[in-house]
Amino acid sequence: MIVIENLVHKYRTPQSGEFAALKGVSLQIAKGEFVVIIGHNGSGKSTLAKHLNALLLPHSGRVLVNGIDTREKEKLWEIRQQVGMVFQNPDNQLIATTVEEDVAFGPENLGIPPAEIRRRVDEAMNSVGMSQYKTKAPHLLSGGQKQRVAIAGIVAMRPQVLVLDEPTAMLDPVGRAEVMETVFRLNREEGLTVVHITHFMEEAAHAHRVVVMEEGQIVMEGSPREIFAQVDRLKELRLDVPPMTELSATLRKEGVKISPDILTVEEMVVALCP
Ligand code: ADP
Ligand code: MG
């Protein structure tokens, strides 16, 4: 679905001149995959995300979305329709006076006929569990609900890939759980390819694959179990591990014989109370 080859991105600032935020990143993401990207602040996660739907273009290397090079100017709208982005701040993403108008905004811009828009909006609202809020004003919703509406707005455009850049960072735990449940369901039931950037390690526990970035490069890549078993390496990279992995590492240091790759509360309970 996505092929990134040797991607270099440079920013130019008056203070520090040219600065490479991505230093030769290569990554492939298969259709239907759920990939989580983690990494310390400034490691290049958002820059990478913006390359996935041509918000930024490579200085060298290339990015292919479903075989389309993001540098092909005449394919820009096709790429934007195929790869939807959700950002951190829910308040910056909703613009209409009602929730359903907001969700209709994307398909309207794609020039889709009104009856088809109606159908897509209803389906999208349903798939994020927000149908009962259709006629509400977006500003009356909770943060988690707003992010689900933002996701519905993308889903209504029938994308192949959903890219989420720290969509839960500004939410309370309830809102975070709502958003994650929604995103995992869209991946599982509708086969949407998901690229999820987060600094909450527990959100990575159920991903198919975890990619770790540091200073513009991919430094680790593997299943959540493979990645989070390397507690010391992650600490070097200034990253946390999921709470249960942390607990199992502490217990092991205290001499408790317990597996190093425990990720969830359920697994911890089974390990401690067989
Ligand atoms: P992350 O999302 O992992 O925190 P970013 O991709 O936002 O990282 O940033 C990577 C690096 O590029 C950081 O050092 C950041 O300061 C720099 N950077 C990001 N955006 C810009 C910009 N618009 N202009 C200049 N430097 C930028
Ligand atoms: Mg970022």
Image (cartoon, rainbow, N blue to C red):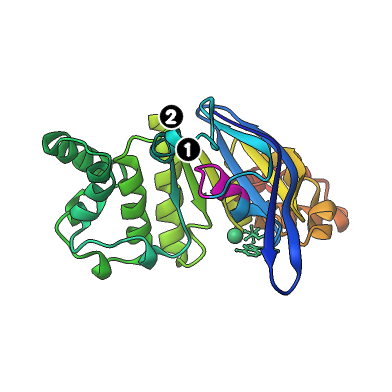
User: Does residue 205 appear anywhere in the picture?
Assistant: no
Residue at left offset 21%, top offset 36%: 112
Q: Which mark is residue 139?
A: none
Q: CA distance from mark 2 to mark 1?
A: 28 Å
- Residue on which the image places disc 1: 73
Whichever of labels 2 and 1 marks the residue nearer the N terminus, that label is 1
- Under tag 2, what secondary structure? loop
In front: 51, or 16? Answer: 16
Bounds of the magenta span?
A: 48-55
Tell me where residue 89 appears, x and y as whole percent.
44, 65
Q: How many marks?
A: 2
Q: Is mark 1 within 8 Å of ligand 1?
A: no
In front: 244, or 234? Answer: 234
Residue at left offset 83%, top offset 46%: 257
Check disc 1 and give the amino acid type. Answer: Lys
Tell me where residue 162 appears, x and y as whole percent.
46, 42
Tell me where residue 225 appears, x and y as whole percent.
71, 40
